[in-house]
Amino acid sequence: MSDFLGTDYYNLDTLLSEEELAVQKMTREFVESEFMPVVTAHHRDGTFPTDLIPMIGELGFFGANLPEEYGCAGLNNVAYGLVMYELERGDSGLRSMASVQGGLVMYPIYSYGSEEQKQQWLPRLAKGGAIGCFGLTEPDFGSDPSGMITRAQKTDGGYALNGSKMWITNGTIADVAVVWAKDDEGVIRGFLVEQGTPGFTTQKMHGKFSLRASDTAELIFDDCHIPEENVLPGVQGMKGPLSCLTQARYGIAWGTVGAAAACYEIALKYAQERIQFEKPIASFQLIQKNLVDMVAEITKAQLLVLQLGRLKDQDRMRHQQVSMAKMNNVAMARDIARTARETLGANGIMDDYHIIRHMMNLESVYTYEGTHEIHTLVVGADITGIDAFR
């Protein structure tokens, strides 16, 4: 087997360009040298390693598939996917941070913002000089975001925001929040809410047993005045937030394969070294079956996202295809984390071995940015022509 992605049973490296392989290697080296030595401590403390943000920006991981003219790396979407794969091979919180920054903050500013907004924010966000978050989900509206309560009332020179957003990655460390709210006519609009704006406060969410090495917050708006120049002019309605979520879900589809591969590789090494009944447990038939099942599922998921990336680069990707990849790959990674944990026996619950951290993280990823059930129904509507939501 080749060394592409650590686990490459089908020699997928032969389908990648030299640039794509180089990006994957660079990301792997960053995660191994800078992130892995500190992730256990941050997971235990419930913190994100913010000191790594400038390095992440310097390496070009933020908005990596956006154009170079705005300070971004200008990578193709397969190379971007490989970045997400390697970041989540470290931790879902690391990939989430970068995924939100690029797919949910930089993407809407690039796609729907004014030229002034692009020039003001994109270069800084690309280098990690500014952090962003994405405010869509509310305490009472997750899977049905169109039911949002947050309102933007027209005022002289702008809007007054009132409401709250929940489960917001990067919420307490963000310099700017891309917030979606309904205007006086009930039309959903996007707003750039800057840190320090009167009436805008954030509150860190405590008690998480998943995505602990990630900043998660509630955003609260109390007569928060947003000037007209901070409104995203290029989109109205649900198309805005949903198109952003498609970008982020694409990254999740890649990233969770990285988490699965990390769990599999730890379990394989452990099975080869752990001696029971005077021989490695990898010699037992049931252990081999589990290892074979894991590498087979990872291989199928790698092929799925690779083709998805090629379609995205050809401008042929459909959001339903992203739903299938998100649905399949997160469920696959969740199952593999559990099987890998079982392979390690009691050691599997120790965070020194990392699997239990991935296992808990994937419970969040299974739910956020569209639950497994919602994506199932999206694909169901696509293949039958019947919308089960109605």
Image (cartoon, rainbow, N blue to C red):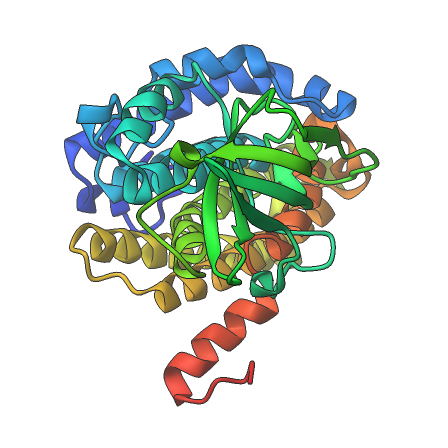
Left or right of 206? Residue 176 is: left
Residue 309 position within the rendered picture, expressed as x and y whole percent measured from the top left: 27, 51
Q: Residue visible at 59% across and 40% down?
A: 160
Left or right of 161? Residue 245 is: left
Q: Can residue 270 be seen in the rendering of this structure?
A: no
Q: Residue visible at 78% across and 31% down?
A: 350
Residue 343 position within the rendered picture, expressed as x and y whole percent measured from the top left: 69, 46
Image quarter hosting the C terminus = bottom right
How many callouts does the rendering have?
0
Q: Residue visible at 26% across and 61% down?
A: 317
The residue lying toward the viewer, choosing from 224 and 113, is 224
Image quarter hosting the N terminus = top left
The residue lying toward the viewer, choosing from 385 and 226, is 226
Which of the 4 image quadrants contains residue 124? top left
Residue 203 position within the rendered picture, expressed as x and y whole percent measured from the top left: 75, 30
Looking at the image, is 327 positioned above or below residue 64? below
Q: Can residue 184 be seen in the rendering of this structure?
A: yes
Q: Residue visible at 57% across and 37% down?
A: 92
Residue 250 position within the rendered picture, expressed as x and y whole percent measured from the top left: 39, 51
Query: From this viewpoint, which residue is outermost toward the front?
Result: 156
Left or right of 370? Residue 278 is: right
Looking at the image, is 375 positioned above or below residue 83? below
Which of the 4 image quadrants contains residue 145? bottom right
